[in-house]
Image (cartoon, helix red, strand yellow):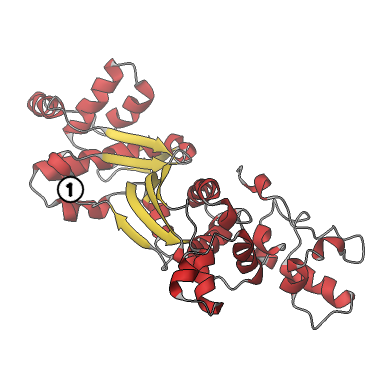
Amino acid sequence: MGSYSVVFAKEMSRAGDLPRALPLLRLLPIVRPSSARRARAYLNRKQPMLEEKYTGNGKVLLLAGGGKIYTDLAARFVRSERELEDIAASPYSRQIVRNILSSGHRAALEFDYFLFGVAGYSRVTEAQLVRKRLASYLIKSGRAELNGKRRFSVVYPREVAEFSAPVALPGGGTATLSGRDLAELTRQWYEAGLEAGLPEENLRYLKPQATEFKAIIGMNAHALLDWFAIRCCRNAQHEIRDLAWKMLRLCRRAAPDLFEGAGPNCVQLGYCPENNLQNARCKGRIITKDEALTVLRERGAPKMKTRDIIGNGKLGELTLSGGMREAAPPSDSEFEEE
């Protein structure tokens, strides 16, 4: 570890921040006075400090979407024999929207589009987010910021930031470092690279997965329903699940007719398609797909599809032999809390 980090640690110790200062001071026991003076001058030049945020505090804004709904209008164009002008002038039909949602023929939902602004999430979530291909993304550049103001901002769970463990040092010996210490050391190395003239687009190779990202996201209602089904589930990673629920709440307020029944798969389907991979907190409370099929076979309806019975609201009336729980779909509100 360089002398800059040692001087930084000494400054923290003078400020009373001994828990963070001591691990850094152990990394280099002897610092030459001349090096210390140069390092102090470097640190006094208003260097950007580590910006730390914790998962669960990301921000989501609905930038566009809701208000007038076009799903019913799109559906009319498919079936109506009227003139275009007459179809366009038709009043909004909530019943048409409900019929589309209950039938599963969701193509018309793709004519309602929603834009979101997202910030305060890590690249861990960014990597999962962009797997949804039927969407549009513009993500903030990882190379430079406006006016040359560079930030080293990280988002991680508090337990990761505070967890400390002994690590072996390249020059020999060990030091006990927390996740926060490692992020700060990486920031110092990154800033030193910038001062040395290394391209930022190359330095970012060592930026952590915890690096914050900012993006604008566009999805149609069909894509959103599919995305909510997967990412609102308890099996989803906690940070992207937080993002999904915040987006869903905004959608419900903006377009309740489209998203009233949206949520994880078990809410939309009435059963859990994860089967053996069902989340531990859901076991014994939410019927799985395999269990639902067993219900149908025991009731003598092998030719009926599971979704047909669930769609008619009949699954909740059925139980498996041997005292199996009721198969009624759960309320989605119970899934919002971790």
Image coords of residue 319 (percent x, y) = 87, 63
Image coords of residue 88 (percent x, y) = 46, 67
> Tag count in the figure?
1
User: Between residues 58 and 13, which one lies in front from this camera angle?
Assistant: 58
Q: In the orientation shown, which residue stands out farthest toward the bottom?
A: 303
Image coords of residue 317 (percent x, y) = 86, 62
**Label 1 sits on what residue type?**
Ala
Left or right: 95, with 237 as reference point? right
Left or right: 101, with 300 as reference point? left
- Which residue is at 57% across, 51% downward? 256
Image coords of residue 240 (percent x, y) = 48, 52
Q: In the orientation shown, which residue stands out farthest toward the right?
A: 322
Q: Is residue 173 visible?
A: no
Q: Provide the secondary structure element on which disc 1 rests.
A: loop
Q: Is residue 212 above or below residue 97?
A: above
User: Between residues 198 and 16, which one lies in front from this camera angle?
Assistant: 198
- Which residue is at 65% across, 63% downward? 277
User: Between residues 228 and 72, which one lies in front from this camera angle?
Assistant: 72
Left or right: 35, with 253 as reference point? left
Q: Is residue 223 visible?
A: yes
Q: Is residue 98 above or below residue 156?
A: below
Q: Residues within 10 Å of mark 1 (few under 14, many from 20)?
A: some
Quarter of the image where the C terminus is located: top right
Left or right: 267, with 123 as reference point? right
- Which residue is at 68% across, 64% downward? 269
**Residue 190 found in image quarter:** top left
Quarter of the image where the N terminus is located: top left
Find disc 1 in the rendering and name its residue: 144
User: Between residues 188 and 229, which one lies in front from this camera angle?
Assistant: 229
